[in-house]
Amino acid sequence: MRVSERMKFDATENRVNQARAFALDTQDQAASGRKLRSVSDDPSGAVRVFRNRSKLENISQFRRTNDYVEGFLGKTEDSLRSITDTIMRAKELAVQQSNGVWDAGSRNTVSHEVQQLAEQIVQLGNSTYGDRFIFGGFKTSHPPISGDGHYGGDDGLIYVQLDEDTFRPINIPGRRIFEIAVKDSGPKGENVPLLRIVQDFRAALEKNDVDEIFRASTRLDGALTQLAEMTASLGARRASVRDAAERLDHLEEFVLTDNVKIESADPVTTALDMKRAENALSYTLNASSKVLGPSLMEFLK
Amino acid sequence: MPTGLQQILNVGGQSLGNSRLGIEVTGHNIANAQTPGYSRQRPDVEANDPIQHGSLVLGQGAKVARIARAHNEYLEQALRRETQVHGRAESFDHNISRLEGYFNPDLTSTIRMRLDSFGSALRDFANMPEEPAMRIHLLETANTLTTSINVTHANVSQLQKDISEELSVDCEIASQKLKEVANLNREVLALQMGDNTRPNDLEDRRDLALKELSKLMDIQMYKDDRGLYTVRGPGGHLLVEGIFSAGIKLDYNSVGTQPRVVATDFADTKSVDITSKFTAGKISGMLDVRDKHAQKIRENLNEFASTFGRSFNQIHERGFGRAEFSEVRGRQFFEGVDGQYEAAQQISVSKLIQQDTDAIASAMSPLTPGDNVIVNELIKTMSQPLFDKGTNSATSFYDNFVATLGSAAMSAKNELKAAQVVKANVETQKEQISGVSLDEEAANMLKYQHLFTASSKIITTADEMFKTVLDLKR
């Protein structure tokens, strides 16, 4: 085989270039700690990374939603519990006062307490979380319970997305709390404002009407049943929000590991590659200096 | 009486000339040891015709018949072919990497990430539709989303423009090389008119010009009986014949989105569109990226913007906003997605919403500030299969076209590596035959030097013999 001058120089140039390119690549990988530096390094892996990053972005958003929903449901539950406590107190008073041992004077005194309870119900009905009236349905910017106890909100259920495929309502429209289906009077299925039941009770106390007081106690009983139902459904919702939060933690851990697997360069492999690149480069340069030097010219004198 | 001392002097003198020529050729070789495209030359020495002298046949020394170049036509052809393949692979890889760069996973400003942020902002908005800050945040993320679509579109179309500019330069270079081949054809012809010497160096230069031309485009050629090259380009278009050459250039007046490559005739009066005919060489790699891959991405971006924008608008138009917009609906969220222009270039958030974020629709029914039904539907559009005949969501559609681009870039890298190895191989083979080796030339120099000394010895010997003869008389 003939070896020409250009062959020698071209081959050397090629070899040195190759060694340098390899060195540069490993250096880049070591410095960035990443093996996925362009889509073409691993197209399907890159797409997986994209999707995982979307998931991470979504997870951080779902966490925000979760925190908000926790707060919103917590406030709702607190308000609902206070309302239940209030009605419970009214019911206690009703049972007590329907007993014949009490006289008009004491019933009058009790009626003042009941008045307080009625005012509390209006206040609790107009509870807010942030600037939102929690019992107004979609009508969140006006107090849903008027002074006479009528419900001014609507039946809107506010759904929010808890994770990739779960939308859940977070609110209880006030109609289900502040309008009580009574079974003892009027046309069937007629709803009476909760406030009116309490106010009727107060009126009965003032009038010292034992029958009316007794009727109020049954109605308050009905209201308590309805409130208990709502409290139970609220509890179920809080549980499902907590479940979603837990799922998010699991998912995040999985997604992060998956991304590390695709994106990150293994430090041990990178370190070995660096050493290899360094050796390759110095050998190539050494060998080149030896091969390129001598020619027959120098030996012919 | 032809033989005699005179004859010995002649033989010696010619041999002296031959060895001097040998040194000259060796010197020429050494001088061109690193000249690209140079083929090593050597004197072809032949014995002179012998003469009959009585019953004897006497040799008459040697002459240099010609100076030949070490050259293999087959390898030259193979090298041109591999140069074309390599030229294409190199420019394709270079340009598709530039295109791929706009979709690099390290970038945080990609459409993909903006879309994710926009989705998050929508969900935040769904949590608190009555909160003005959420509306402003949604508007901001929508603006960055449309900007990133606009910018990506601008990048891709700018790349197409850049490639066209580079193409126009390369077409000019190709035209010059074609002219050079025609000129060298003319010089070769002129030299051949005089005698039958082979114009080695001119042929080397012509081969080099053709090799450089091969880097740019696919050419086929054949040599006619006078040793002149006829060159045909892409699609068999005649580019050089004898001393005439055609040119190729970029036609900016051509119809269609991108300027076309046209080839002229010898008189530069007519031109033919040969854009789709390129199969190899640098120009074909650039055309492929410009007209296929970049164009495809551009179309995909437009489809992305218009389909996503329109589906989003459709739902948005059904919803009511806040404050003064709480009882009116029918507003678009995105503008510029229905027009005849490119949607990816035009898409933006509607001016009304830019001015007043209360115009963003959130509610299904009027006068219900807490109603987020429409927002939830908008959230669902983000993951709905709007693309590819209802099989892919916006993000999957984006992922798919980026992955397709990535795969093309990956195979381009591999093709380039393969083309480099093959081309280097053929180049080595060619160099083995045609290249100059200094060791060899050193030996040759010594060889001719010895020959020179020996030849001069013959002359001095003959001279002494003359003297002896002349001294006889004294």
Image: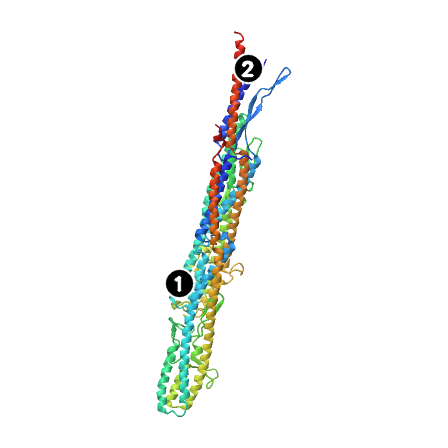
Number of residues whose C-alpha sits closer than 10 Å to that of mark 1, classed few (under 14), some (14–19) or many (20 or more) = some
Dot in front, 1 or 2: 2
Q: Is residue B45 left or right of residue A174?
A: right
Q: Assign a secondary structure to mark 1.
A: helix
Q: Looking at the picture, does residue B407 appear above or below residue B386?
A: above
Q: Chain of mark 2?
A: B
Q: Which residue was labeled with disc 1? A: B137
Q: Position of residue B121 (x, y in %)?
A: 42, 63
Looking at the picture, does residue B70 appear above or below residue B311? above
Q: Residue at x 52, y 15 (%)?
A: B463
- Mark 2 residue type: Gln
Can residue B255 be seen in this snapshot? no
Quarter of the figure with residue A71: bottom left
Q: Which residue is mark 2?
A: B6
Position of residue B205 measured from the top left corner of the image (x, y, whole percent): 50, 33
Where is residue B184 drawn, in percent x and y?
51, 32
Residue A157, how many percent across, how many down?
A: 45, 72
Q: Secondary structure at mark 2?
A: helix
In the foreground, A226 or A187:
A226
Instruction: Give the class, few, some or many, for how many residues have Cα within 10 Å of label 2's Cα (few <14, many ≥20).
Output: some
